Image (tube, rainbow, N blue to C red):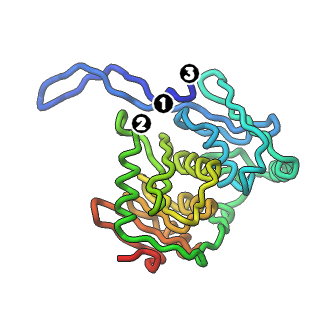
Amino acid sequence: MSAEASYRRVARTALREGAIVEGERAVPEEVPVAFSYGGSTHAVMMASPADLVDFAIGFSLTEGIISTRAEIRSIEVIEAGQGFDVQVDLQDANADALRARRRHMAGPVGCGLCGIESIEQAVRVVPDLSGAEVSVDGNDIVAAVKALNGAQSLNRETRAVHGAGFYNPQGGLLAAREDVGRHNALDKLAGAVINANLSPDAGIVVVTSRLSVEMVQKTAILGCPILAAISAPTALAIETAESSGITLVALVRGEDFEIFTRADRIIL
C-alpha cells in the first residue's frame, strides 16, 4: 500500500427515497502506524496512511520526545505488512531521555494520551501562552474554518475524516492535514508547522472535531495561542485553555461562533 493511498472505493447498497440503489462509495483507509525510536516501538496508532513524516514529527513534539525539529536526525517510513513502521532517529540526548522514560513506564502506550505513567499526568502541565501578544479579527476565525473546509480533499471524497489547519491572517491557510483520528490530524499539522519553520504564535489552529483536553494540550505544546473548532469543547478543555492562556473558540458555524477563554484576542 502506498503511504498516500488514503481511501478506496467499495461497493454498497443504498436506500434512496424508498428505492434500492447499487453503487460505490469512497471510504478512508485506516492502518496501524508504529513509531519506533532507536529500533524499539514506542506507540502504535490507527491512522490514515498519509503525511507520515509530519505525523512522526508532530507526535514526537506533542509527546515531549523532542522540543524542536533539529532534535530528529532522520525519519524513515517502512511498509510493514498492513501498516507502516515510522523509524525516528533522535539526537543522542533525546534518545537517552526517552530510554530513561521507558524504564519507568508503568504499562503499554495507548492512543490520545501516550506514554503517561499516572492519572495525574493525563492532565499534564503545558506551556503558558498567556503572554502571547496576538489578536485576530472575528472574520479571521470564520475565514480559517472556511479555508480548512476547502482544503479537505480526503473528507470531500469520504465524509469520514477529521481536519486540522494552521491559519495566518496575513498568509491565509498555511498548512492543513487530515486523518481518521482527530488527535492524529492535529499531530500531523504540528509536524507540518514546525517542519516548514512556520511561527505557531502568529496564527490560529483550527480543527473540525470537538475540543477535548488533549487537543488543547497539543496546541499549547505547539505554541499556538488561539484554537478554533466547529464543535463544542469539554469542561476540562476550557479549564486547560484558561490555565494555559489559550483563546478557545468553538461552535464556528457560518459567521457565528462562541469564545470561551481569552476573548480579548478576538476583535469583534
**Rendered location of residue 192, percent (x, y):** 59, 47
* Identity, as a three-letter code, of the amino acid under mark 2: Leu
Residue under numbered circle 3: 1
Q: Position of residue 20 (x, y in %)?
A: 17, 22
Within 10 Å of the Cα at label 1, are there few (<14), some (14-19), or many (20+) other Cα atoms?
Answer: many
From the top left corner, tell me how far across and down residue 41 is, in percent. Answer: 74, 37
Residue type at tag 1: Ser
Determine whether label 2 and label 1 are within 8 Å by CB.
Answer: yes
Which residue is denoted by mark 1 in the rendering?
6
Quarter assignment of residue 45: top right
Q: Earlier in the sequence, mark 1 or mark 3?
A: 3
Q: Residue at coordinates 43% horizontally, 64% vertically from top-left?
A: 233
Question: With respect to residue 29, does 95 lie above or below?
Answer: below
Please provide percent x and percent y for residue 12.
30, 22
> Which residue is found at the position 57% from the left and 60% from the top?
219
**Rendering quarter of residue 42:** top right
> What is the C-alpha distance between the residues marked 2 and 3?
17 Å
The residue beneath circle 2 is: 154
Q: Quadrant of the N terminus?
A: top right
Q: Nearer the viewer, residue 49 or 53?
A: 53
Mark 2 or mark 3, which has the lower sequence index?
3
- The answer to whether 160 is drawn above or below residue 196 in the figure is above
Of residues 130 and 107, the one drawn nearer to the viewer in this rendering: 130
Left of 39 or right of it: where is 169? left
| Secondary structure beneath label 2 | helix
Residue at point 55%, 37% (across, down): 47
Query: Which residue is outermost to the bottom?
Result: 264
Q: Estimate the spatial distance between the alpha carbons at disc 1 and disc 3, rounded to whole Å.
A: 9 Å
